[in-house]
Amino acid sequence: MSKKSFRQAVNEALRQEMERDPTVVLMGEDVGGGMGAPGEDDAWGGPLGVTKGLMSQFGRERVLDTPITESAFIGAAAGAALRGLRPVAELMFVDFMGVCFDQIFNQAAKFRYMFGGTAKTPLVIRTMYGAGFRAASQHSQCLYPIFTHVPGLKVVIPSSPYEAKGLLIQAIRDDDPVIFFEHKVMYDDEEDVPDDPYTIPFGEARFVREGEDVTIVAIGRMVQMASKAADALAKEGISCTVLDPRTTSPLDLQSILESVQETGRLVIVDEANPRCNIATDISAQVVEQAFESLKAPIRMVCPPHTPVPFSPALEDAFIPSPEKIAAVVRSVMASPTRQAAA
């Protein structure tokens, strides 16, 4: 085991799966880079260098630079998955889903259902998301709620390098289409990651820490923010459970419900816009299935319902922070309990 960045963990997962299975291929814009241009071959590896080095090892027959036409190569990847390959297609930024969404939600997501359960579509679509990179509103959105809404898609949102490697290997081995979200701000984050391949099952949440007073459910990069908030709150005597769902489809609702039944309080941290996001979905399901366990209203920590600002000061204010999370947890702790109010 050695320290690896999020970028290195993703790269290693791809390399190890390509070594293990010759049907795994990569597709996307500049995932190899340098083709037909003077200078260094394999110059790019995608916009942030995640796939760098794979083309030189596996060749251009398995690492395919595509034209700048997402509808074409996402459609091609879906078709290739039906015909026996295991494509990993890179949708450079999730914000570009608008030009290829039909290929995803009307085609790949429905193949198994439309063909009576006989079709397999082992397709992974890797994509970058999230604010904090100074990339403005057309390259910074959190659109995983839209994909979570679609039956037939599995949606994965890793929160650390360790999680990224294990979840990506699981995604590549899965026989259904998986949308794999990588937060662009996290690529340089480092932690200990096993050198050998390993998998993390979908639909099993991770308890980052366990406490007695409040359950904090946080998604993707927000797990880091929630953990920092929990550290600060612990010094004030407030004990928090921090739970990372890992996947929003399938969602490990049972672990969330069990934690809420123990703590009686729930705060959900979601970087997606507040209307119809994952926080609202979890909130509704907890109210429906565990209302009697709640001691205080559920609170959500989300950005405002606006595009992501380009101004650094406004972008920083837009993103849920440990301070904002801690303030909301304190307000939940200060709420009169429902039992006392009754």
Image (spheres, rainbow, N blue to C red):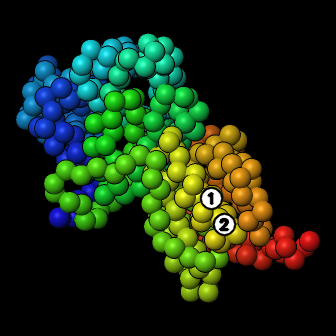
The residue beneath circle 2 is 261
Q: Is residue 146 left or right of residue 163?
A: right
Q: Residue pushed farthest right?
A: 342
Q: Can residue 333 be seen here?
A: yes
Q: Can residue 188 be seen here?
A: no
Is 102 located above or below residue 255 in the figure? above
Identify which residue, 205 or 141, lies in the foreground: 205
Please provide percent x and percent y for residue 180: 39, 39
Please tell me how crowded label 1 is: few (under 14), some (14-19), or many (20+) other residues with Cα within 10 Å. Answer: many
Report the number of numbered marks.
2
Please provide percent x and percent y for residue 274: 68, 46
Q: CA distance from mark 1 to mark 2?
A: 6 Å
The residue beneath circle 1 is 257
Please provide percent x and percent y for residue 233: 59, 79
Q: Residue at x 29, y 30 (%)?
A: 88
Kindly state the secondary structure of the residue where label 1 is placed.
helix
Is 100 located above or below residue 242 in the figure? above
Please tell me how crowded label 2 is: few (under 14), some (14-19), or many (20+) other residues with Cα within 10 Å. Answer: some
